[in-house]
Image: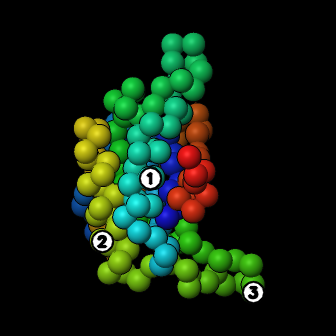
Amino acid sequence: MKALLQRVTRASVTVDNEEVGKIGRGLVVLLGVASADTENDARYLAQKIANLRIFADSEGKFNLSALDAQAEMLIISQFTLLADTRKGRRPSFIDAAPPEKADKLIAYFVEQMETTGLKVATGRFQTYMQVEIHNDGPVTIMLDSGEKVQE
């Protein structure tokens, strides 16, 4: 499972001219699910994202987590994070999970984020979305559950 995090001052997602999700200061989480991903990957990423210290303290240092900063989360499914561009000119998405599996794991990830107590908004799975992001910093970080360190 891959998550591209963008720290934002505000963000929103629109489907068919209807705003379906909106946050203030927080993180936009663009989430891609691979065929081999499980609920363990979703739990790992939810905890990692909630506790990753990427918000500035009073001295401007990355010392605060989303939990510390009471950040808001906008979670958007994005299978294109699984693009394989090594061959040819057209990306391959062969490693992306089938829609039924991806939908379930994204919903599970959202549930895991909601258990943190942070405000969570989402886009709509398998729809054309327009996402407005006001990147703060800019701070953009890629996480991959397949690269987690075994503790």
Q: Which residue is mark 3?
A: 88
Question: In the image, 27: left or right of 90?
Answer: left
Mark 1 → mark 3, Cα distance in angstroms: 33 Å
Task: Indicate which label's residue lies in the foreground, 2 or 1.
Answer: 1
Looking at the image, how many numbered discs can be counted on the residues? 3
Q: Is residue 4 visible?
A: yes
| Residue 35 percent across, percent down from the top left | 48, 78
Say whether disc 2 or disc 1 marks the residue closer to the N-terminus.
1
Label annotation for residue 44 = 1
Mark 2 → mark 1, Cα distance in angstroms: 16 Å
Q: Write the residue at 34% across / 58% down.
A: 109
| Residue 24 percent across, percent down from the top left | 34, 36
Q: Are marks 1 and 3 in contact (CB under 8 Å)?
A: no
Q: Is residue 61 above or below residue 47?
A: above
Q: Is residue 42 above or below residue 80?
A: above
Q: Nearer the viewer, residue 87 or 97?
A: 97
| Residue 78 percent across, percent down from the top left | 46, 67
Q: Is residue 106 above or below residue 133?
A: below
Q: Write the residue at 37% across / 64% down.
A: 39
